[in-house]
Amino acid sequence: MPITSTARVKGYVQGAGYGRSEIETSPLTNAAAVPTLLEIVLASGANTIPVPAGSKAVIITCDPSSTRVKTLKGVAGDTGIPIASSGRGGSMLLKFTTAVTSFVINSSGADTGIITRFQFI
């Protein structure tokens, strides 16, 4: 029996003089999902993350107790986008617009005993 998965980001922005603005993305649905959770202790340097066939997105969760800077990269040599730093973890949704077989998370050092989670949908 096929598995369907759906992800959506909801939240709000609020601050002095700004009021409150709701944020909600359109749902991302995968009617042929192969839900996979990878829990990885990142090594220092480039960590290649395999993407399960058929995945349309991944939720990356970096533990805020990590003191390492983490950078999302398409390949090991590019500049990338910082996604976590010391004490600044959290989750992000990364949507794949084409078939992806892997991506790279570069860590500024080994995350000994600290898990980074990758939930594919």
Image: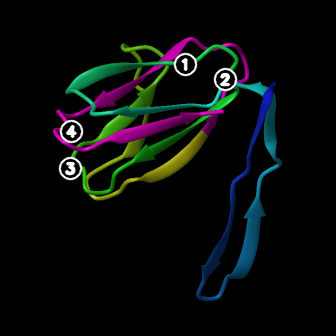
Q: Could you tell which of marks 4 and 3 lies nearer the N-terminus?
A: 3
Q: Could you tell which of marks 1 and 4 lies nearer the N-terminus?
A: 1
Is residue 108 rendered magenta in the image?
A: yes
Q: Which residue is mark 2?
A: 55
Q: Which residue is mark 1?
A: 51
Residue most extreme to the front: 1
Q: Which residue is mark 4?
A: 111
Disc 2 + disc 3, Cβ < 8 Å:
no
The residue shown at (73%, 50%) is 8
Q: Can you tell which of label 4 and label 3 is closer to the viewer? A: 4
- The 10 Å Cα crowd at callout 1, few under 14, some 14 to 19, many 20 or more, is some
Of the pair 119 and 62, the residue shown nearer to us? 119
Q: Could you tell which of marks 1 and 3 lies nearer the N-terminus?
A: 1
Is residue 70 rendered magenta in the image?
A: no
Measured in 3D between alpha carbons, the distance from the residue under mark 4 to the one under mark 2, in whole angstroms, is 26 Å
Label 1: element kind: loop
Disc 4 + disc 3, Cβ < 8 Å:
no
Left or right of 1? Residue 113 is left
Q: Could you tell which of marks 2 and 3 lies nearer the N-terminus?
A: 2
Q: Could you tell which of marks 4 and 2 lies nearer the N-terminus?
A: 2
* Label number found at residue 76: none
- The 10 Å Cα crowd at callout 3, few under 14, some 14 to 19, many 20 or more, is some
Q: Can you tell which of label 1 and label 3 is closer to the viewer? A: 1
Measured in 3D between alpha carbons, the distance from the residue under mark 1 to the one under mark 3, in whole angstroms, is 26 Å
Measured in 3D between alpha carbons, the distance from the residue under mark 2 to the one under mark 3, in whole angstroms, is 30 Å
Label 4: element kind: loop
Residue extent of the magenta highlight: 94-121
Q: Which residue is mark 3?
A: 67
Question: What amino acid type is highlighted by mark number 3?
Answer: Thr
Question: What amino acid type is highlighted by mark number 4?
Answer: Asp
Q: Quadrant of the N terminus?
A: top right
Question: What amino acid type is highlighted by mark number 1?
Answer: Val
